[in-house]
Image (spheres, rainbow, N blue to C red):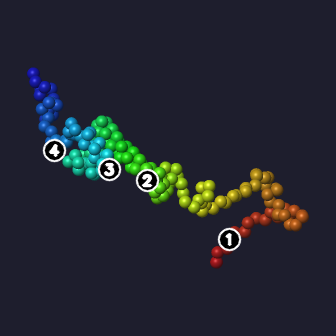
Amino acid sequence: MSDRGRLPGRVKPPGEKLTLGRPRLEPKADAADAIRAACESGASRQGVAMALGVSVDVLTRWLDEHPDLKEAFDQGREKERRTLHDALTSAAKGGNITAAIFLLKARHGYREGEADGAGNRVSVTFNIPAAMPLDKFMVIENGSQAEPVPAKPALPARRG
């Protein structure tokens, strides 16, 4: 007896199922090298996708599904960062003040015009008294004498 007799209705066994839609694109064997080279040259995600001939969504899926492609992407980006950092550091050491200031700001949190990180911040201090009993709280100081506040019931508000 075939598998067909045991399956309900129109259900087909897994081997006989037809796949609908366009087949999924899979990365080529040299995709990791292409991704690394594109990232090293400073390409954005869209640029990397164009270098591979796929959409950004397909590239994102590949990076999520294939750890070796994600690693190649990260390695390419890191190599580009190192190249730019070395060039910037060389320029700063060679006397380029703008490069030196940029490195100070980007790498060490330097802010122009701020003394000790205070900047233009407002400092407000609230001194709150300690807890006290109600009878002492109800005393109004009048010169050197202190007299308790008379206990009057609150009057209802008038609306007119």
Camera-nearest residue between 151 and 140: 140
Q: Earlier in the sequence, mark 4 or mark 3?
A: 4
Residue at image location 25% in from the left, 48% down from the top:
49
Judged left or right of residue 159, residue 139 is right
**Which amino acid, mark 3?**
Gly
Q: Which residue position is annotated with label 1?
A: 157
Residue 49 visible to an observer of this rendering? yes
Expressed as whole percent of the image width and height from the top left, the position of residue 96 reads 46, 57
Q: Nearer the viewer, mark 4 or mark 3?
A: 3
**Can you say whether 93 is above or below 23 in the image?**
below
Q: Give the label on residue 91, or none.
A: 2
Label 4 crowd bin: few (<14), some (14–19), many (20+), radius 10 Å: few
Q: Amino acid at mark 4?
A: Arg
Give the number of the mark in front: 1 or 4: 4
The quadrant in which the C terminus is found is bottom right
Circles 3 and 2, Cβ within 8 Å, touching? The answer is no
Visible residue check, residue 106: no
> Spatial distance from mark 4 to mark 3, Cα to Cα?
32 Å
**Quadrant position of the N terminus in the picture:** top left
Q: Residue at x 49, y 56 (%)?
A: 101
Dot label at residue 22 = 4
Q: Position of residue 75 (x, y in %)?
A: 34, 40
- Which residue position is annotated with label 3? 42
Horizontally, residue 20 falls left or right of residue 58, namely: left
Q: Amino acid at mark 2?
A: Ala
Q: Amino acid at mark 1?
A: Ala
The residue nearer to you, when weighing 36 against 121, is 36
